[in-house]
Image (spheres, rainbow, N blue to C red):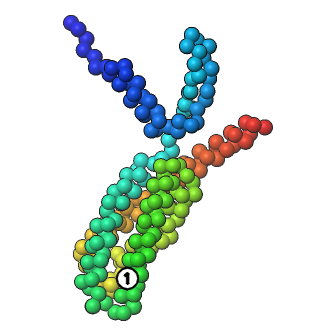
């Protein structure tokens, strides 16, 4: 009986290894060691780096990015249908909210992606603050204010967007907390290690 094993050819395995090293890690950061073995080559060893990005946050941002244009189209159609029945001050408020939410959502999603994937505290903090202080109150206003003549489709898309925002606020807080703790620990190790 022969044992059947699946093994990649050596040249394919090497190419995949090089590709993943260059894509997943920063190739400019490495520890160079001179090898005293017969090939006598410089060897670059990548330091172990713990990935701090939040998968939950990233998935929520990804699906939100694809849902937001649908929400925007539904909001435009519903606003067009009920515009003539609304009082003048609600017309102004709803148009303003739509413009503000569109601008904030684009900035918020960009900051969320940049902060989470690049593990940057300021961007992630900006994303979290925009989510909690601006987007959440605006979407809750549109969801619970019956005077703006909420249509069933509107209620449905507002519920989904508010779930996205709440999920991202929670996941963003956890990711931000972990990132700050890691940065604080790394800074402390560098600062006290050099003394």
Which residue is depicted at the point 57% across and 10% down?
Answer: 38
For mark 1, what is the residue?
Answer: 94
Q: Is residue 18 above or below residue 66?
A: above
Q: Which residue occupies the foreground of this view, 133 or 102? A: 102
Which residue in the rendered view is the most extreme toward the left?
1
Residue 89: x percent and y percent? 39, 91
Which residue in the rendered view is the most extreme toward the right?
195
Which residue is depicted at the point 53% across and 36% down?
Answer: 27
Residue 163: x percent and y percent? 36, 63
Residue 164 visible in the shown view: yes
Q: Quadrant of residue 63?
A: bottom left
Q: Which residue occupies the foreground of this view, 169 or 112? A: 112
Residue 171: x percent and y percent? 45, 54
- Label 1 Cα crowd, 10 Å radius (few <14 / some 14-19 / many 20+): some
**Residue 50 located left or right of residue 185:** left
Q: Is residue 71 above or below residue 189?
A: below
């Amino acid at each position: 009986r022969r044992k059947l094993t699946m093994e990649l050819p050596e040249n394919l395995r090497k190419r995949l290894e090089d590709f993943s090293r260059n894509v997943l890690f920063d190739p400019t950061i490495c520890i160079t060691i001179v090898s005293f073995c017969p090939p006598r080559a410089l060897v670059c060893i990548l330091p172990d780096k713990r990935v701090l990005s939040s998968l939950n946050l990233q998935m929520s941002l990804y699906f939100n990015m694809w849902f937001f244009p649908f929400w925007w189209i539904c909001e435009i159609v519903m606003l067009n249908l009920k515009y003539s029945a609304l009082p003048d001050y609600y017309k102004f408020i709803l148009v303003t909210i739509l413009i503000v939410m569109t601008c904030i959502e684009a900035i918020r999603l960009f900051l969320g992606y940049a902060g989470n994937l690049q593990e940057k505290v300021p961007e992630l903090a900006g994303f979290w603050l925009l989510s909690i202080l601006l987007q959440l109150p605006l979407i809750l206003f549109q969801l619970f204010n019956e005077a703006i003549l909420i249509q069933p489709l509107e209620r449905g898309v507002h519920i989904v967007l508010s779930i996205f925002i709440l999920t991202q606020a929670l996941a963003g807080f956890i990711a931000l907390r972990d990132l700050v703790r890691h940065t604080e620990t790394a800074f402390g190790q560098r600062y006290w290690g050099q003394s």
